[in-house]
Image (cartoon, grey):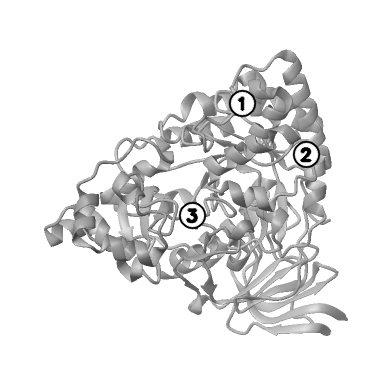
Amino acid sequence: MSYDLIIRNGTIVDGLGGEPFTGDVAVAGGVIAAVGAVDGDATREIDATGLLVTPGFVDLHTHYDGQAIWSDRMTPSSAHGVTTAVMGNCGVGFAPCHAEDHDTLVDLMAGVEDIPGVVMTDGLPWTWETFPEFLDALDGRRRDIDVAALLPHSPLRVYVMGQRGVDREAATAEDLSQMRTLAAEAVEVGALGFASSRLTLHKSESGQPIPSFNAGRDEIEAIARGVKDAGGGLIQFVPDLVAGDYGPALETVFAVAADVGLPVTFTLAIGNAGDPFYLDGLDLVEKANAERGPDDPRVSAQIFPRPIGLMIGLELSGNPFILYPSYRELAHLPLAERVAEMRKPHVRERILADQPASDGHPLMFAAQAWEWMFPIGDPPNYEPARSDSIASRARARGVSPLEEAYDRVLDDEGRAMLLVTLANFRDGSLDTVAELMKRDDVVLGLGDGGAHYGMICDASFPTYMLAHWARDRPSGRLTVADAVRELTSAPARVAGLADRGRIAVGYKADLNVVDHAALTLHTPVIVRDLPAGGRRLDQTADGYVATVVSGEVIAENGVPTSALPGKLVRGRQSAPA
């Protein structure tokens, strides 16, 4: 037989956790046509001797809602083996939206997801109003990988209720009926479900809580029933992690999902210290699943496989001095001039003696979490020793943490970055994360690709899974087969995308060829490739020999090709017969 592509003699990791084996993978017409010892020839062959061959990775939690409109590259995700990205998470996005509410949604995304307003103003053509029209806009653009979308709650609320929705007034019966109708419409044309949030930190740039913040049970249920009316889909939810209170909000969402018959995935964070409140969330998951039948939709906690944190520095959205009036006097200067000023003794003394203002992004409370702040290093270390924290380094030097941080942000001519580990780093390690990743009711996610352009670069987590968790960690490692399963079939199952995430005949030919021994994650860098010249954090890796989407090679040895086979995935997908 003749095929489009044959990957020869690789170590095949099937995506289901099965024992890896040596063999070939043949592709024809965008799907896997043969696995094992493959006879015949192909238009292109890749020698994978000594290399891993895995399914393409599925990222459940991204925010490429804007980037998928203005760019054909979903980086950083596509540089780390991701071949399907789900967006619309946290209940924020750009559709549905009346023309008069464009500024409202821009303000919302700027605050919640750290996307500069000018980037969205320049990059979004707003050729849509309804959610179906937004999906059509996505469908009309070529890109490197597949994208799928959830219906975001806050835009839906504003679309139906106008300023009443922005002001978080209770929805009327008429409002609820319209939300249900629009949710059904969204799923009918391809939404995977809907997303909502009541996280305290999720605020607009102008400082207001998101429209969905205190939405009542009747509203959640109306939208969920709309999803069910159109055949079903996923509920994605962010509880108030800051308050450490998983109870009431999750209980409401789980009860609605059980009544309506929908699966749920929600954000779970592990506190670095103090009461292990994350266990309350897991208890609720176990209870919810125990009350469902074996064939009913499941509830899953979604975790991130390294510390949830911020990148801070002089070129980024935050740094330890961002709220200081004396620093703000210099903040407008080009980096080189700012560094020169900050190195002057009298400027240093004035900034270090200053007090922070009370305004600013709500996450900036963490910009002085000295015990949990670390130089990122090159290569980046996401499980650093406590002795390397800014607080520990300051004690060793006999200076204040503020002084140590001041010196560190001036390293590398002001380009140095610090990692603030906000969560998941319990007692200074990832041991708790290791325990949770082995649970069937926990799924990986929260990479946030396409958002937090100036403070987070977590879309690289698939590479971290394979390099750190399945190779480098001194203890508690995962097998390669288990790590790949958590990146492929597990998230595909949660998303309802049963046509991908495994290597078997008939499945979508999304594949990675990986030199596991050479896999290396590079330190994040700043690039200026957003609309209006906006800057973002980007991160690359070595070791990806080839990434394949629908049978086409989109990148070789870390370099993108001209192939742009990525499509909009419309709705849940069935497994091949």
Residue positioned 62% across, 41% down in the render:
106
Q: SS for tag 3? A: loop
What's the residue type where badge 3 is placed?
A: Gly
Residue 194 coordinates in the image, percent (x, y): 68, 36
> Given contact means CB atoms under 8 Å apart, are the residues at marks 2 and 1 in contact?
no
Q: SS for tag 1? A: helix
User: Residue 74 vs residue 378: left or right?
Assistant: right
Residue 172 coordinates in the image, percent (x, y): 70, 14
Of residues 265 and 354, which is closer to you in this image? 354
> Mark 1 to mark 3: distance in Å?
26 Å
Which mark is drawn over residue 313?
A: none
Residue positioned 82% across, 83% down in the render:
42
What's the residue type where badge 1 is placed?
A: Val
Residue positioned 34% across, 50% down in the render:
329
Identify the residue under disc 1: 166
Mark 1 closeness class: few <14, some 14–19, many ≥20 residues within 10 Å: many
- Mark 1 or mark 3, which has the lower sequence index? 1
Compared to residue 564, the image places residue 312 above or below, namely above
Identify the residue under disc 3: 454
